[in-house]
Amino acid sequence: AEAQDAATVNELMEPLHPADIADLLEQVDSSERAAILKVHEIDGETLSELDESIREEVFDLLSPGVLSDAVRELESDDVVDIIEDLEDDQQKAILDALEDNDRLAVQQALSYPEYSAGRLMQREVVAGPEHWTVGEAIDWLRSREDLPDDFYHVTLVDPRYHPVGNVTLGKILGHRRDVKLKDIAEDSFRTIEATEKEADVAYAFNQYHLISAPVVDEDGKLVGVITIDDAMIVLEEEAEEDILRLAGVGDESSLSDKVVATTRRRAPWLAVNLATAIIASLVISLFEDTIAQYVALAVLMPIVASMGGNAGTQSLTVAVRAIATKDLTGSNVLRVIRREVLVGTVNGVIFAVVMGLVGWVWFGAPMLGAVIAAAMIINLVVAGLAGTVIPVVLDRLKVDPALASGTFVTTVTDVVGFFAFLGLAAVVLL
Amino acid sequence: AEAQDAATVNELMEPLHPADIADLLEQVDSSERAAILKVHEIDGETLSELDESIREEVFDLLSPGVLSDAVRELESDDVVDIIEDLEDDQQKAILDALEDNDRLAVQQALSYPEYSAGRLMQREVVAGPEHWTVGEAIDWLRSREDLPDDFYHVTLVDPRYHPVGNVTLGKILGHRRDVKLKDIAEDSFRTIEATEKEADVAYAFNQYHLISAPVVDEDGKLVGVITIDDAMIVLEEEAEEDILRLAGVGDESSLSDKVVATTRRRAPWLAVNLATAIIASLVISLFEDTIAQYVALAVLMPIVASMGGNAGTQSLTVAVRAIATKDLTGSNVLRVIRREVLVGTVNGVIFAVVMGLVGWVWFGAPMLGAVIAAAMIINLVVAGLAGTVIPVVLDRLKVDPALASGTFVTTVTDVVGFFAFLGLAAVVLL
């Protein structure tokens, strides 16, 4: 029966794309994963599609033979991606499985900083001298046995091996054999430094619609190439990171994380939130006597703070994203702050009127309505201001605004919300 | 002096990439924009890089001649992208400027639903019969005058013009003239239906590392091609949309939006938040007598609600993203819910201990500490449950979970937070 199960599993997996097999392995639980891997021989591509959170577990389940076969199929950038987060002994096992020149390529890539272009690039480049013609390029490409699986340009290099231009394969195919490559090179040509941050690389691909770009070392020599599919993955990861950081989830890697790992990642954020909530409570405690005399204040006070928190989150999210996409710069920051303050004022007035009436009708006290209305305007203006200024300042201080803005902004809107409402109430109502 | 200014402006803009010129136009204010456009002749590519929010304004500033020259430079998919959101008279002006067959292509694209593959695709395809050899393909490509600027595959079609395979240009260049194209076609080959949603197209490109894919009509005939750069833009937009929706900013398009437009987009979300805040206040008002007797409750009660709201936001953000990336499916939903509830329990216990001690020490009342501790555990467990179940249910009901989850989850955590804390206090302390 077991042999039959094995045949069934393999039959079901056969038509699947490696990315889908990897997803399947992520979605089942540990024991099912072990059962599948016992009967299904995993290949290199599936390995490189696996989410980090289960990679170590899967590697431990594989026999050394299957693992080295799988890894040997991969290009150097994929091997780097797989092993950079592994523990030393697993890393060593995989490096040992590689052929000598592949191992060297991987080790060189690992010598670049994490999250740099050097880690992201493929080392297999297709380059030729700048004086080549279309015919010479085609003859040379045909003669090579080891062309990369995917390449989109022939990069032209000068005698010092510095890239000087990029010719798309479409242009090479569309021109006669005697046309010079440099005459059909792309107008806009950019090189990427190997030490550049991968987030900046992804930005450049997106902004300038690049399809592949040569990577150079500190001497300007061509050392690799980055293609758009790698940039797309980074772009997706950056957006994902912003979403999770804005929500106070840190860099949670995936749904397959265990309870302990997840708790450990989220608890610090809740601790920070607890600290800010206690600060807000301290503000409330300043007005204990006022509340004791007028309990309606306790009923209404969370509304002002909550509205401020929401409006502040709106402003800060827009600001954080605009900073990430380089749309918010020194040249328009004052105008954006002005806009957010005005939006806060207008929304403040709208919801002051609504809430003023609600407070009046609910508790039959017009002055209570007036107090909550005034506090609402104050807090929404402050929310617009803090929601923009705080992320901008954090960014200038080289702190990721996605990571820290939320805490600061809600602390401000909580404190201002409770203080304005209860303070005005103490003065006006008692 | 004006002529000199004009020369300076043009000199400064000359070396810039169209994407950067577009950014610059977005970052200055309206009057500066008008001044620049008076002296700088905008080209088609810059036009297609402009953010929607200022597109209409810029179009109104351009003379009909400049506008038609600019539009005529563009490929059909870029024209579609520019005009789909314009008002009818502006749309007509641009269509009239196009040559007959370009206009037809644009009109056909506009006949597909918004946000569909048909709107996204380029109509210029590079396709040949399935029996071609490498040599025949190269000869044909060289003979054509009208090759697209960017293409990455030759698509093989059968006699009914149904796509049957994709050959990368790299493979064509790497093989001898007599090799058959179908022998070097890619292993994995996917076609996209013209009516497919663009979000699903972007997902397929990202999941299967596609570089370009043929688009077919309802009869399976080849009608266009989508390339990875278009998919990358959609992927970025989808992530952006999720971030903004999660923050209750709707689909704010950009920093250059005016105060009125921004207020109009954000106010409805604040109104929804006000409604949920009032619901929370109603819960508090049930316990007015309790609070009047024990004012410390008013000081501490926002803490439990705030912690629940934060923990709920953590869970729901992870769930919303996992739904968007198709990582959360029917096969693992129960396991994920179980994990979130367990994480909520563990964090609940941790912060119950911390807050129980704080409450005890601060107010010198051990039972008050016990009440807040119990309420904390209850609310954090509920937060984990609601934060996962609510987005999953909304998704099943075909409501975008990014758009609506936040409101529901915070309503639940507010209500449960206040009710558990004040209710337990009423029973235990009085």
Image (spheres, coloured by chain):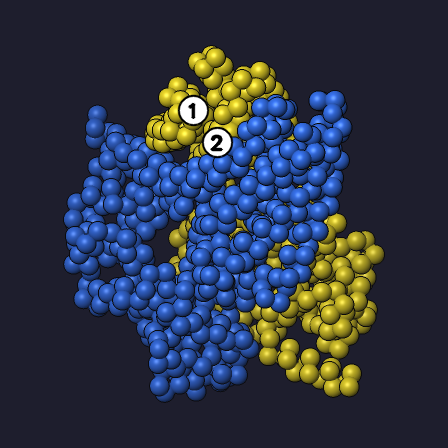
Chain colours: A yellow, B blue
Q: Chain of mark 1?
A: A
State the image coordinates of residue B240 (x, y, percent, origin top left): 46, 48
Q: Is residue B18 left or right of residue A4?
A: left
* Helix, strand or loop at mark 1: helix
Q: Nearer the viewer, residue A311 or A90?
A: A311
Please give the name of the residue rendered at 54% of the width and 70% of the height, measured from the top-left corner: A141
Residue situated in front as seen by the camera: B107 or A92: B107
In the rendered structure, which amino acid carries the disc numbered 1?
A: Ile
* B374 lies above or below B327: above
The residue sitting at 28% across, 53% down in the picture is B85
Q: Amino acid at mark 2?
A: Ile
Residue B10 percent location from the top left of the image: 29, 37
Are tags 1 and 2 found on a single chain? yes
| Disc on the earlier residue, 1 or 2 | 2
Q: Nearer the viewer, residue A238 or A79?
A: A238
**Residues marked 1 and 2 touching at CB (< 8 Å):** yes
Q: CA distance from mark 1 to mark 2?
A: 9 Å
On screen, A267 above or below A256? above
The chain holding disc 2 is A
Q: Residue furthest right?
A: A89
Disc 1: which residue:
A372
Question: Quadrant of residue B95 in the image?
Answer: bottom left
Instruction: Identify which residue, A288 or A414, lies in the foreground.
Output: A288
Q: Which mark, by number, is residue A303?
A: 2
The residue that appears at 45% across and 65% down in the rendered structure is: B201
